[in-house]
Image (cartoon, grey):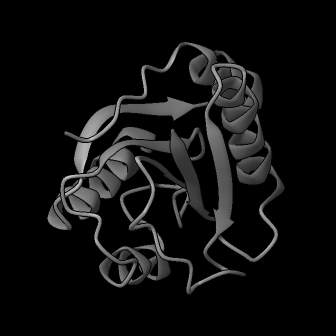
Amino acid sequence: MQVCCVYAGKDRDDRNLADICRNFAKGLESQGHNVDIVNINTDPDTKLSFYDYIIVGTVAKTAFGGSIPESLVKYLARAGQVSGKRCLAFVTKAGLRSQKTLSLLMKAMEGEGMYLKYSEVIKKPDAALALGKRLNVERNL
C-alpha cells in the first residue's frame, strides 16, 4: 500500500511533528507499506491522489487550541483527488484544547470528502510508532 503522512506545523521546521510522522512511517513500513512524508510548509505542491491511505497531522496554532493552520486547509483543497480516501487525523498534545483542534482538523478533512478511519491526540513520537504498527491500512474499494 502507498501511504502518505502529511503534516503542517507552526513553522517550517516542526521537529516534534516530523518525529511523529517518521515513527508512523516506521510502524507502517514494518507492516510492509510504502510511506512518504510530506511537510506542506516545504512541499506545498505534493499531490495525494495516488495514495491509498493518508495520515494528516498538525498542532494547534494557539495555546488554547481551537484553530489549525490555514495553510493545511488550503493544501487539502488543492491536493488532488482525496475524496473517498481512507485517512487518519492526528494533532500533537499542546495547549489546553487539543481535542477541539482535532475536531477542526477532522472537519476540514471531511469537508474534502476524506473518509476518517481513526483520529488521535498524540503526546509523544513513541505513541505514533505503536499506532503505526497496529494501524489497519486497507485499500479503497
- Camera-side residue of 14 and 53: 53
Q: State the image coordinates of residue 64 (x, y, percent, origin top left).
A: 46, 55
Q: Is residue 130 above or below residue 23?
A: above
49 relative to 58 in the view: left or right: left
Q: Quadrant of residue 76?
A: bottom left
Where is residue 32 drawn, in percent x and y? 65, 25
In the picture, measured across the screen, residue 130 lies left or right of residue 19, that is: left
How many numbered discs, if any? 0
Residue 58 as seen in the image, left or right of residue 22: left
User: Looking at the rendering, which quadrant does residue 38 occupy?
Assistant: bottom right
Q: Examine the rendered structure and indicate whether residue 137 appears above or below residue 78.
A: above
At 66% across and 21% down in the image, what residue appears?
Answer: 127
Q: Is residue 96 visible?
A: no
Q: Residue 59 location, x and y as percent? A: 56, 55
Instruction: Give the answer, above or below, for where 123 lies relative to 53.
Output: above
Q: Is 78 left or right of 65, judged from the image as shown? A: left
Report x, y in % for residue 10.
65, 70
Q: Look at 54% across and 13% down and name the residue there.
A: 134
Residue 141: quadrant of the picture: top left
Whether residue 85 is visible: yes
Q: Residue at x 66, y 15 (%)?
A: 130
Seen at 28% across and 59% down, the residue is 109
Relative to 22, say whether 117 is above or below: above
